[in-house]
Amino acid sequence: MGLRTRVAVALVGASGLTVAAVSASSSDSLPAPSLPDPVAPGIHVPSPSPLVHSRHVARWAAVRRAVVARRGPSAAAAGVAEIDTRTPEGTANIVQVLGRARRSTGRLWVRARLPVLPNGTVGWVPRRALGGYNLVRTRLVVDRRRLRATLLRDGRPVFVARVGIGQSRYPTPAGRFYIRNKLTRYSSPTYGPLAFGTSARSTVLTDWPAGGFVGIHGTDQPGLIPGRVSHGCIRMKNAKILELGRLMPVGTPVTVR
Amino acid sequence: MSERNTSESIGALELDELDADGALREVSDALGHPTRGQLLKGAGVGGAMLLAGAAGPVAGAVAKGSAKQDREILNYALALEYLQAAFYTEAERLGALRGEFAHQAQVVGAHERAHVKALRQTLGASAIGRPRFDFRGVTEDQPAFRRTAVAFEDLGTAAYKDQAPRIKSRAYLSAAIRIHSVEARHAAWIRRLAGVLPAPDAFDEPLTKSRVLGVVADTKFVVSAPRTSAFGSPRYTG
């Protein structure tokens, strides 16, 4: 008998003994051993639910390091603008994230809407120049003809206000922008109790302090609203800007039409 | 949470001994190898809570001291679940993954979000806040995602294994074991997809809290929120 045959015989014999032992114990009248009841879990884990995708989601990121935005996703592409890490108000500079590309080198690039002139400028920045992604589900639409601002959340209106916009010689620029920051607790009645900074810039007041950025803010002259009364900013009554302050997060896309 | 060795310094930990496959090392190198100290300094409230746990009572009928310890353990688990849930959720939202990796992220992300929801409900007001994360591109690049996912799942499994014997409440222990085995399945799944042996050893080793948090800190994925509001006077066009 070869080694493999001897091993096989031994295994068959052992399994036969096991079967015999099990049969013997099952035929005995001894009670079957009982186990205590299982412990009920103290944490209820709900059924996993799939992620809800929404076309109303926009993404933004803070600029982590100063960078030159480029026309294409390549360090060799022409520069579009220099993007700093801070706004003139001292807050983190942010960009709206529109897309991405991965180079054959493995380097990731992000396509971003930029807070520079000309308005509407889009450029590419290395992913590593940006911080983490943040999502918003809101969008502000400013209708210059009807002098009205509407905030949408998940595509549905949640806020409407009459507004003041730029005079004809200082027009509020049309286009797609985003909310860059929010200022409060300042002592400047002209701007009301709260002011949002946007990525839009006046095309006329280019020498305005801090770059001529268009804001959305309150006012100390509520009687002028609605109207074409400002230097380009979007004004609303103080109660409305405070309400908007509770509803609209930084990073919200803004459409001025 | 009581530490086995309170004198153990996070900064003195060696990543190599925690990361036998080199997965986290690769991620860390790809990110410029930030130090744990940098993360600890840079993390905001959420990150600090992640690294420190939180105060407050846990619902349930366990003695006061035991309840405190259980609460700390559950908050620690919640911190890791926040990390994993955010990682997979961002990967799915960005849509950069393909094939089985996309499917894995979709399924595991749903599991991790369920774990977060369960732990938050159990902890109630004691639950730590959700930290901010910056995944630095690993959620939008499949090779980087693969390496990070392997590391995260191994890390989560080892963390649950370390803490489970310390849980005083049998009801919480029962729940933790149920989550732990799911994390182990996640680890095996992503390891198979990544071409790494799913079960390389007969016995798995636990990782202490300080070691786990040291590895998390090394990734520099936990960040402070960018400052987007201020009190200064506006200089907008008016």
Image (cartoon, coloured by chain):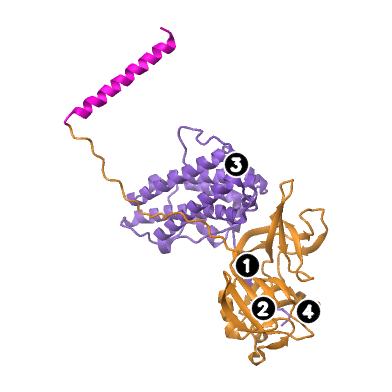
Chain colours: A orange, B purple
Tell me, yes or no, whether the two marked residues, 2 and 1, touch with CB atoms within 8 Å: no
Front-lying residue, B130 or A72: A72
Label drawn at residue B227: 1
Where does the image place residue A173, in percent across and percent down from the top left?
75, 77
Closer to viewer: mark 2 or mark 4: 2
Give the structural element (helix, strand or loop) at label 2.
strand
- Residue B10 pos. (x, y %): 54, 48
Image position of A244 (left or right of A86): left
The CA distance from mark 1 to mark 4 is 24 Å
The nearer-to-camera label among 3 and 2 is 2
Name the residue that disc number 2 marks.
A142
Magenta: main secondary structure? helix
Q: Is residue A17 above or below residue A76?
A: above
Q: Which mark is residue A208?
A: 4
Tell me which residue sits at (60%, 76%) in the image.
Answer: A151
Disc 3 marks which amino acid?
Ala
Q: Which label's residue is closer to the chain start, 1 or 3?
A: 3
- Mark 2 packing: few (<14 Cα in 10 Å), some, or many (20+)? many
For badge 1, the amino acid type reads Arg
Gap in angstroms between the C-alphas marked 1 and 3: 32 Å
Residue density around tag 1, few if under 14, some if 14–19, many if 20 or more, within 10 Å: some
SS for tag 1?
loop
Above-or-below relation of B39 to A58: above
Residue B114: % across, % down:
46, 55
Q: Disc 3 and disc 4: Cα gap in Å?
A: 51 Å
Q: Which residue is denoted by mark 3 in the rendering?
A: B23
Range covered by the magenta-colored residues: A1-29
